[in-house]
Amino acid sequence: MRPRNVVLIGFMGAGKTVVGRALATHLDFRLFDTDAMVVEEAGMEIPEIWATEGEPGFRAREEKVVLRACAGSGHVIACGGGAILSMKNYGVLKGAGPIVYLRAPADVLRARVDIGGEGRPLLPDDAAFGRLLVERVPIYESAADLTIDADAGTPEQLASLIEQRVSDLPERPDRTIRL
């Protein structure tokens, strides 16, 4: 059965956006990248949002775009790494469609993200990377309807695998948005 929407979660650098783009093409769905939506809505980049509004301001903006991305059907929703941490977002995302956790080993993630760079305000150093990874992985695992190893193929291959596997998931009657 074809899902109404597909939600991609995972740590920074897992490939949610690039795999999401390929998956949206496979399914003929529209891609919603929540980080890109926040940037567009704010008119400034994420580090600037963090500098001027802090994490609470960023998370409030993120909640608004998650609601927009989950409205309707035919969407691949590539979530920012922390989007699933909010209980409000979790409920909305869970109601939107199957949640796919793109899992990647720490060394792969570390190589893909700019630790200490301006683009990752939550990753000032390697210790912060390790702490965040330890905190978030269990949340990703418990939220997921399906886990895919993000380093097991090209974005196209992963998109094909996700398309096949989400079609095999049983439809859940509770797939409605509850706030």
Image (cartoon, helix red, strand yellow):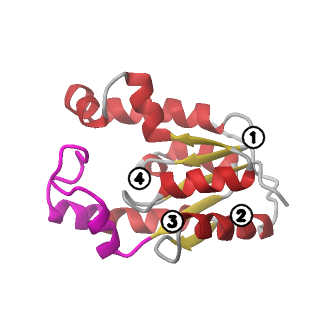
Quarter holding residue 57: top left
- In three-dimensional space, the C-alpha distance between marks 2 and 1, rounded to whole angstroms, equals 15 Å
Q: Give the residues in magenta.
A: 104-132
- In three-dimensional space, the C-alpha distance between marks 3 and 4, rounded to whole angstroms, equals 11 Å
Tag 3–tag 4 contact (CB < 8 Å): no
Q: Which residue is mark 4?
A: 81
Q: Quadrant of the C terminus?
A: top right
Residue 111 lies in the magenta stretch: yes
Give residue 40's position: percent from left, percent from top.
43, 27
- In three-dimensional space, the C-alpha distance between marks 1 and 4, rounded to whole angstroms, equals 22 Å
Q: Which mark is residue 163?
A: 2
Residue plotted at (77% across, 48% down): 4
- In three-dimensional space, the C-alpha distance between marks 3 and 2, rounded to whole angstroms, equals 13 Å
Point out the tag, 3 or 1, that comes first from the N-terminus.
1
> Residue 101, relative to residue 153: is it above or below?
above
- Label 1 element class: loop
Q: Which residue is mark 3?
A: 102
Q: Which mark is residue 176?
A: none
Residue type at tag 2: Glu
Q: Which residue is mark 1?
A: 73
**Disc nearest the viewer among 3 and 2:** 2
**Disc nearest the viewer among 4 and 2:** 2
Residue type at tag 3: Leu
Tag 4–tag 2 contact (CB < 8 Å): no
Point out the tag, 2 or 1, that comes first from the N-terminus.
1
Give residue 155's position: percent from left, percent from top.
54, 64
